[in-house]
Every structure is written in structure tokens, then in C-alpha cells.
Image (tube, rainbow, N blue to C red):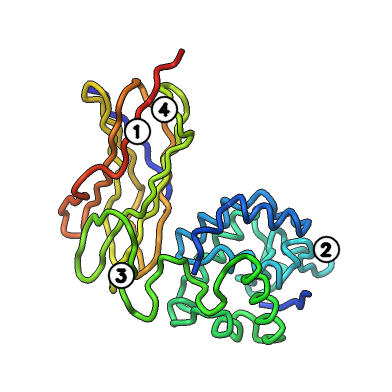
Amino acid sequence: MLALALATAVAASCAAAPVAHAALGPRQIDAFLLEQGSPLAGEGETFYLAGERNGVDPAFLVAITGAESSFGRFLFSSGPETATCNAFNWFYASTRAGSAFAGWGQAIDTVAAGLRGPLYYGAGRYSVAAIAPVYCPQGTQDWVTNVTAYMLELGGDPGDTRWRAAAVDGAASTVAGTTLSKAGGATLVVQRPVVVTPRRAMAGARLRIRFTLTDAGLAPGIWQAVVLRLEGPGGTELAFGTHAALRLAPGASYAFVATLRLPVAGRWRGWVDVQTQSGTLASGTGPVLRFTAAARR
């Protein structure tokens, strides 16, 4: 029996310018940014995954960059200091000059996590209008107008900037998928579809498996571990798990991505197992995916 383990980490100033909907994918984001002449073009997947992990509509994240920096084309600078890669004008340091990021990805992840935090979603601020006075205390109405326009262009909902699967007004979200565990009002669900790329899997070739976990309940939840378990021909087993505990607010989502090479050809099935805080191991009632890997020629 072959067993492999691979840990995957899946864990203001304002400028005037002329939910989350899962349908807005990385390609659509990149196409939109390319039309704007944005240096952020190519970061579509980063926007998408950051939004998914934090329960934020990626259309909202993109729209903020439009209102704040014309989609990253005009970054704040003071003398020789520039807020590198800070397309959001997210001044997380005490001075603007200290608000540089190491890359676009770090900036996107930081802002998505910040929006999920206590100042915004944690305080019940979900709409563009509710978020604006905190995010942009000066020129607030211009910010609302511009962010709203960009969100609508991207197919988002300015009235609720959360990921589309999020619970609304305290009601449980109706997430289609496999329920893994229910505890204390939290309900962990594997959303469909579970995506395997390339579609024609081949033994020995690089394969990517991606799915989304969502707390579809009415209370936050903590799960000590999440493991994708694959079973293949001849009892072959593969396991891929998270580094740390998974913490989700109601309606929040987490993107799980595993990259692997299948050792043998044949039929494969996959389950998602989670360990609850009490130590109980839970999983769905059946496989969350099935696929066949072709033999290499």
C-alpha cells in the first residue's frame, strides 16, 4: 500500500475614478483587468482564491483597486517612497510610506482578510455603502459611486459584497454539496463541483484537485484538520491535509487545493475527512469525486 502526505496551505486614503458571484472566475477577472491596462492582469486566480478563502466577492476586491488606484496603475507615493503593489491604498502601517507589499498577491490576501475582520464583515458591514465610511472616510460618496459601478460591471452585488455562498441576514445558506459535520450550529460542507484538472488525468502526470469548504450553518466553526483522501487501484492511498485548524465564520469559505502525481492508472475515488474539536473524525456519506486515470503511453 502506498501512502503519501502533502500539506497544502489552503490557510485609507481615497481616489476618485471615472454575492460574491462564483460565476466571476479567474479568467473573467483577468480579461477585465487586461481591458483596463492594469498591471494586476494575470492575478485573476489570486483575487478569486483570496475572495473564496475569506468570504469576499472577488468583484468587490477588484472594484476597490479601480476606485483607489485605477486598477493598480497609479500607486501612492511620497517623495522617494512608493506604496509598492498597494493597489487598494490599504494603509495598514502608521504611515503611508510604510504601506508597501512584497507583491500583488500579498496585497490581495491582506485586504481580503481585512475585509473579513472586525472592522467590516465582523461588524456587520456588508454593503459598499456600509463599508465606505470606514474604508474611505474622505470622499466617501465618490468611492461608493465608483466601487458600485465597477462591481456592477463585473456582475457583483454592491448591496452584499460577500461571497455568493455566504449566509444572508442570519439565515442558513443553501449550499449544494456534501455535508461533512455539524457541531454547535456550524455545518461544514464540501461545495460542488470538485474540480480535477486536467480533465483527462494520466498516471504520473501532474494533477490538480480543487474544492471549496463552506460553513453553511448559523455559527462559526473550528475543525482541527481537513484531509483529502484518495483511494485507487490495488488499495493505493494518498492523503493531503492542512497545516493548521480551519476556522470559518458563518457563510465563509476556504479553498482547498492539492497538487499530485497519481502513481498508478485506473479508477480513483476521493473523500474529505475532518477532525472536529472534540477529536471526532467525520466525513461525508460517500465519495466527493470519482475519476479514471489513463495509463501513460
* Tags 3 and 4 touching, CB below 8 Å: no
Q: Nearer the viewer, mark 3 or mark 1?
A: 1
Q: Nearer the viewer, mark 2 or mark 1?
A: 1
* 29 left or right, relative to 294: right
**Residue that mark 4 sits on:** 261
Give the amino acid at mark 3.
Answer: Pro
Q: CA distance from mark 2 to mark 1?
A: 55 Å
Per the image, label 3 sits on a secondary structure element best described as: loop
Q: Nearer the viewer, residue 59 or 256?
A: 59
Quadrant location of residue 107? bottom right
Q: CA distance from mark 3 to mark 4?
A: 35 Å
* 280 left or right, relative to 22: left
Give the amino acid at mark 2.
Answer: Pro
**Residue that mark 2 sits on:** 80
**Residue that mark 3 sits on:** 220
Residue plotted at (21% across, 25% down):
235
* Tags 1 and 4 touching, CB below 8 Å: no
> In the rendered structure, which disc, 4 or 2, sits on the residue that comes first in sequence?
2
* Tags 3 and 1 touching, CB below 8 Å: no
Q: Nearer the viewer, residue 64 or 216?
A: 216
Residue 81 coordinates in the image, percent (x, y): 78, 64
Q: Nearer the viewer, mark 3 or mark 2?
A: 3
| Above or below, 176 relative to 77 | above
Residue plotted at (15% across, 54% down):
280
> In the rendered structure, which disc, 2 or 1, sits on the residue that comes first in sequence?
2
**Residue that mark 1 sits on:** 291
Residue 150 coordinates in the image, percent (x, y): 67, 70
> In the rendered structure, which disc, 3 or 4, sits on the residue that comes first in sequence?
3
Q: CA distance from mark 3 to mark 1?
A: 33 Å
Give the amino acid at mark 1.
Answer: Phe
Residue plotted at (72% across, 59% down):
84
Residue 56 coordinates in the image, percent (x, y): 50, 66
